[in-house]
Image: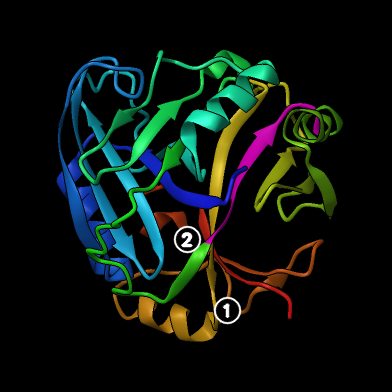
Amino acid sequence: MFERIQHIGYVTPDLDAAIAWFEKSFGATKAGGGPLGKGYALPSGGRNAYVRFGNAEAELLEPEDKSSIPGDILTMHHVGYVVADIDKSIDELTAKGFKFAADKPNTNVLGHRLLYFDSTTTNGVKMHITQLPDQMDTTGIGSGIDVERIIHAGYRVKNLEQAIKWYIDKFDGFHLGGGPSRTGGRNAFVNFYDVQVELIEPPDTDSMSNDHTMDHVGYVVGDIPTCMGECQSHGVKFVSETPNTNGVGQQVMYLDTATSLGSRMHLTRLPD
């Protein structure tokens, strides 16, 4: 059902600064955007922009009411999953017990038909399904850093076993593997359909207010050192000099959040 991750959505108090960061750091190109009315994604309304780099996309959302935005310029907001037939997918997901935030999909400025899940049925986190148009607007595709695709969104969870089971039961997922995480907790990778999620249980879950919280995004590249050098030439720093290898054989290099507007993201080299 889910063919790939179309984009990660970020909420920001300063849309222009967020666009400028992606343009400078990743060589991204703005592909569209504009004013947004009041709705599920932004209850107060606001404006958005889409930026593309390599084969990846990010949606940046600036709400009219900024009072609830965290202090960072970039805060993860949602994940958009591509489906081949959105109407068929709605029926199949409804049969699995999912609810949606509206009665029917809407069409965004890029011509994508999309519909948000009701987050009460997705562990409190926002995600939407997206059907792409037959004739895609290719503005910005292939520009900047050579990102092949988004490999996964990462979530912090209160109970790792329960989270794994949820993806297996709800999305016909497969537990790929995992182990101790870099931050001292535990993690797991679950593949479902043609996409992946990383689940991270921190050492201390008492301070977590939600069962699931968005944590990071992983961008796939063919060569980490080359992409690191390109990013470093534009002021981006990394947490170490060499990548580490996670529990499923992926080489991972995190950006230093001090140079990524406070948002966690990593470059990823997949195993051969």
Q: Secondary structure at mark 1?
A: loop
- Residue drawn at (62%, 42%), measured in percent from left and top? 1
Above/below status of 119 relative to 225: above
Spot occupied by residue 23 in the image (x, y as percentages of width and height): 23, 64
Q: Is residue 157 magenta?
A: yes
User: Left or right of 12: which side holds 244?
Assistant: right
Label 2: which residue? 256
Q: Which mark is residue 86?
A: none
Local crowd at mark 1 within 10 Å, few (<14), some, or many (≥20)?
few
User: Left or right of 232: which side holds 248?
Assistant: right
Q: Nearer the viewer, residue 85 or 123?
A: 85
Q: Report the predominant secondary structure element of the magenta stretch.
A: strand
- Residue drawn at (37%, 55%), measured in percent from left and top? 57
Specify the segment rendered in magenta: 150-160
The colour style of the image is rainbow
Label 1: which residue? 241
- Residue drawn at (61%, 45%), measured in percent from left and top? 154
